[in-house]
């Protein structure tokens, strides 16, 4: 079983920022590359945003410091830093608001469809070569909205309301 997961979210005029603190499991932290498939073998956090045109924008950060995004233009413009601990890991993520559909800073009361998930490696408990089309993963998964493995499931997204920057 996984331990506590704490997520703090804030924004400034140009970025949406996340502080993640995942405790309770010694992380698998081997992947430090960018946009490679091995990111899915590590402990990781995944962030999903639903843009105004119904496009899902997906970011992932691994405990090893790896990054992945389906937004091709995003690869060099968003940042993350990771710190592994004996019994968990922490990450700071900064994503330009322009990557998730904002041409100007959000106003107080604006909202965004959003989801975040945590995956932790659990060798022996899950298939070595999972069938991702069936939702199989290599580890345990915890979603903020309890949508199970369907991370990008649009109806399961939560709503993130903005206050002033």
Image: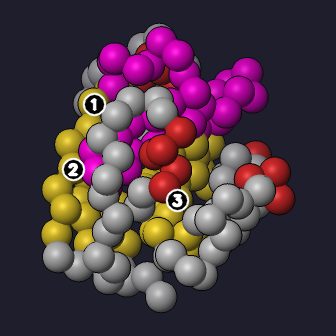
Q: Which residue is mark 3?
A: 117
Could you tell me how far apart the alpha carbons at marks 1 and 2 are, in whole angstroms?
Answer: 10 Å
Q: Earlier in the sequence, mark 3 or mark 2?
A: 2
Q: Which residue is mark 2?
A: 82
- Along the line of sight, which residue is nearer the eye, 72 or 33? 33
- From which residue to which does the magenta span run? 49-78
Could you tell me how far apart the alpha carbons at marks 3 and 1 are, in whole angstroms?
Answer: 18 Å
Q: Which mark is residue 79?
A: 1
Q: Going by the image, does 133 lie left or right of 156?
A: right
Percent coordinates x, y for residue 144 in the rendering: 55, 66
Q: Is residue 158 above or below residue 13?
A: below
Q: Residues within 10 Å of mark 1 (few under 14, many from 20)?
A: some
Q: Visible in this render: residue 72?
A: yes
As helix, strand or loop, the secondary structure at mark 2 comes to: strand
- Along the line of sight, which residue is nearer the eye, 140 or 92? 140
Q: Which residue extends farthest right?
A: 134
- Along the line of sight, which residue is nearer the eye, 148 or 13? 148
Q: Is residue 87 above or below residue 98?
A: below
Residue 117 sits inside the magenta stretch = no
Could you tell me how far apart the alpha carbons at marks 3 and 2 are, in whole angstroms?
Answer: 16 Å
| Quadrant where the C terminus is found in the figure | top left
Residue at point 50% right, 76% down?
122
């Amino acid at each position: 079983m996984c331990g506590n997961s704490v997520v703090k979210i804030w924004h400034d005029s140009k970025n949406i920022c996340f502080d993640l603190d995942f405790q309770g499991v010694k992380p698998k932290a081997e992947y430090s590359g960018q946009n490679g498939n091995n990111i899915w073998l590590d402990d990781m956090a995944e962030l999903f945003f639903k843009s105004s045109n119904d496009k899902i924008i997906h970011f992932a950060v691994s405990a090893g410091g790896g990054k992945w995004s389906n937004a091709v233009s995003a690869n060099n413009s968003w940042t993350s830093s990771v710190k592994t601990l004996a019994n968990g890991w922490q990450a700071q993520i900064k994503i330009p608001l322009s990557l998730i559909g904002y041409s100007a800073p959000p106003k107080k009361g604006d909202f965004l469809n959003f989801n975040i998930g945590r995956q932790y490696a659990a060798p022996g408990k899950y298939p070595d070569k999972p069938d991702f089309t069936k939702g199989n993963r290599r580890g345990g998964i915890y979603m903020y909205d309890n949508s199970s493995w369907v991370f990008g499931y649009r109806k399961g997204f939560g709503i993130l309301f903005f206050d002033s920057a």
